[in-house]
Amino acid sequence: MSTQAAPAIEARQVHKHFGHAVALKGVDFTLPQGESLTLFGPNGAGKTTLVRILATLARANSGEIRLFGQDLAEGGSNLRRRIGVVSHKSFLYGALTASQNLLFYARMFDLADPHRSVEEILERVGLAHRMHDAVGTFSRGLEQRCAIARALIHDPDLLLFDEPFTGLDPEAADQLVGLLHQLHDSSRTVLLTSHDLNRGAEMADQIAILASGRVVYQARRDEFSGADLASLYRTATQKGRA
Amino acid sequence: MWRKIFVLVQKDLLSEWTSKEILSSTVFFSVLVLMVFNFGFETVADRMAAGPGILWTTFLFAGILGMNRLFLTEREDGGIEGLMLCPIDRTTLYLAKWLSLLVILSLTEIATLAVFILFFNIALQGGLVALILVIVLGTAGLAALGTTFAAMAVRTRTREMMLPMLLIPIAVPLLMAAVKCTGAVLGGATLASVSSWIQLLIAFDVIFLAVGYMTFPTILEE
């Protein structure tokens, strides 16, 4: 990746409130293209709100966000072509089969050969054998794999994962980690939010800690050891609350 | 834009064809309501005077059921957010949802109308085309309102109550016009005799389609 390339994400003083409840109080961070960042934080810290804003699902009340150098507020549907989102909701329709769901999204993203794209992505996430089964019959782990296929089908440059391990059993979580490692190796930019300190840190180039609506800590992976992470997290979240 | 609308409507109808969740409940509900009205008005001398009101009351309540279900399906697995992540203008989503709702309500109304004709022993006297026109105009307006308000209501905990509370007061002019026009057609009169009510139906459709089209992106994001 060229050093001249604009950062994948550049957030400056992002504020968001819901009525009187303040979710984000001036979030600042930068994520270069091709890197991965795991965002930790306690419940209510604003992680999901931040991901929703980056995904264009919600608007910030103030502040500036640029994705790949383009203003998020103006980028609209063009930027959405470059973003893939996986959250604890699958964004899939239970009554439709895996292939029908993915074919729908492939057409929405104007893919040249939607059927071929669906077959390839299902093969990649290990769901080819279940492509004709209704998503409503899937276990949580299979549904999450299908959700990843949905997020990847248009080959996005930026992947946003909002607590993707929620509700997964350890085996399904390990499979998801394997998939995430593959994605990280593919030079995509990845932002992941998680409560799971070990899993989250394992696959990140950078970590950041969000507490009370602010980024209170950000460091590269080589700047801390795994053993320090829990105490680092405790200190940072206490500092955020203070 | 129209190609995307086609893909979205096709997805909604395929989902409904597979699950039959909406149509099974709206049609069954309509038949039950007509059955209750049929028994309730059995001893009334001029049942036909109440017929148009009964028909549109049934359309309205079955429609509300369908509107809630259509958006709940999107809400349950975050489907509406999946749609918002697609590279399309969010006004396109409004038109697609309006069209899907229009098709689903129309299918419900075809079944309802057949049962209504049977229960109330209606002879259409060649007014079928006029009746279809009135129903299409009325349903287009109901779907325009329903798409806007169901998208709002589905985010609340009291969605089953919220949608009728938002929709019914605003739908009153549309219902009045639809009942007047239906009464005229069933009574053997031409639509020309109720042209002012037809104009009201058309104006209602245009205004609330425009309002929904303009406000839908904000409703989705907030």
Image (cartoon, grey):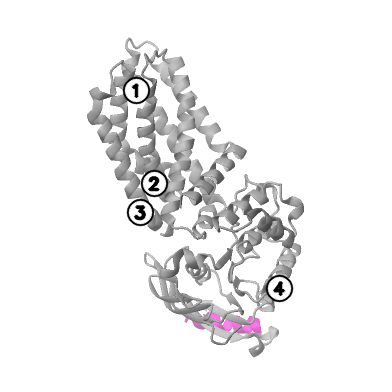
| Chain assignment, label 1 | B
Q: Evaluate whether label 4 is on the same chain as label 1.
A: no
Q: Which numbered dot is residue B149? A: 2
Q: Main secondary structure of the magenta part?
A: helix
Separation of disc 4 and disc 3 at Cα? 41 Å
Tell me which numbered mark, 3 or 2, is placed earlier along the sequence.
Answer: 2
For marks 4 and 2, give the one nearer the viewer: 4
Q: What amino acid is labelled 4 in the image?
A: His
The residue beneath circle 3 is B215
- Across and down, in percent, residue A58 comes to 45, 64
Separation of disc 4 and disc 1 at Cα? 64 Å
Q: Evaluate whether label 1 is on the same chain as label 3.
A: yes
- Across and down, in percent, residue A223 comes to 64, 90
| Chain assignment, label 4 | A
Quadrant housing residue A171: bottom right
In this view, the residue in front, A13 or A8, is: A8
Residue that extends furthest to the bottom in the rendered view of this protein: A223
Mark 3 secondary-structure assignment: helix
The residue beneath circle 1 is B52
In this view, the residue in front, A147 or A232, is: A147
Q: Evaluate whether label 4 is on the same chain as label 3.
A: no
Separation of disc 3 and disc 2 at Cα? 11 Å
Mark 4 secondary-structure assignment: helix
- From which residue to which does the magenta span run? A229-242
Q: What amino acid is labelled 2 in the image?
A: Phe
Tell me, yes or no, whether the two marked residues, 3 and 2, touch with CB atoms within 8 Å. no
